[in-house]
Amino acid sequence: MYGGHIGIAIAGKGYRSTIPLWLLLLATQLPDWTDAAVCVAGIESPPSEMLSHSLPAIAVLAAVLSLAYYATVRDLAAAAFVALVVASHGVADYVTGLKPTWPGGPVIGLQLYRQPALDFAVEGVVILIGWEIYRRSLPAGRQRSKAVRFLLVALLLLQLAASVSFAVFPGIKKC
C-alpha cells in the first residue's frame, strides 16, 4: 500500500489531533523506511522484508516508536495509538502485497499490486475515508477549503501514479 498508508495517517490525525501529523506519517511508513534502510545497508540475510514487514518486525517497530513518543509526551493512550498506526502498515500491506509473517512462517497477502485498477480502487477508498475523517476534525471554516480539497486530489494522484507504475512495470523490485 502506498497512498493508503498516508490515508491512514491523516485519519489518525483526525482521531487524535494532539499527535503531530509528521509522527503519524512516520508511523504508517516506518516498515517501508526500515526496509529501504536495510536494503541500502546491503543486509541480505535475513531478507529485508523479514526485518521490516514480518509480524515480529512490525511489533518491534511499533514498540520502539511508541515508547519513544511516550518518553516525550507521557501520554499512554497517544503512545498506544502510535503503535496501532505502525501496526496498520502490516494489515494494509497484507491486502495489497505479499509479505512474510515470521521466520519460517508463511508469506501471505492478496497481491492487489498485480491488479493495478483494483489496487487503485481499494487504496482510493482508504485515502477517501482517511481524508474524510481528517476533514471532519477541522474547524467548520476550513473543512471545505481549497487546501483540504487539494490534499485529497494530491493523494489520489499519488496513488494513481503508483498504480500505473505497477501496470507498466509489473514485478519491479524496490531494491
Image (cartoon, grey):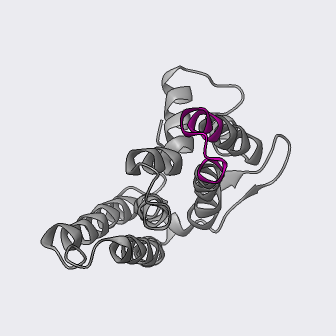
Tell me where residue 65 appears, x and y as whole percent. 59, 38
* Residue closest to the far right: 104
Residue 159, picture quadrant: bottom left
Q: Is residue 69 magenta?
A: yes
Report the span colored magenta: 66-80
In this view, which residue lies farthest toward the left? Answer: 146
Q: Nearer the viewer, residue 9 or 69?
A: 69
Q: Quadrant of residue 4?
A: bottom left
User: So how many labels did they put on this image?
Assistant: 0
Say if 40 sits above or below 150 in the image: above
Image-based side of 129 in relation to 82, left or right: left
Is 153 a magenta residue?
no
Location of residue 108 in the rendering, given as x and y in whole percent from the top left corner? 72, 60
Point 80% across, 45% down: residue: 102
Residue at the location (16% across, 74% down)? 145
- For the point 62% across and 41% down, the residue is 66
- Depicted 5 relative to depicted 64: above or below: below
Q: Is residue 160 above or below residue 82?
A: below
Q: Position of residue 106 (x, y in %)?
A: 81, 53
Looking at the picture, tell me which residue is in the foreground, 22 or 29: 22
Q: Is residue 75 left or right of residue 157?
A: right
Image coordinates for residue 173, horizontal then vertical, percent = 48, 43
Q: Residue at x 71, y 39 (%)?
A: 57
Residue 164 lies left or right of residue 117; in this view the side is left
Quarter of the image for residue 46 reads: top right
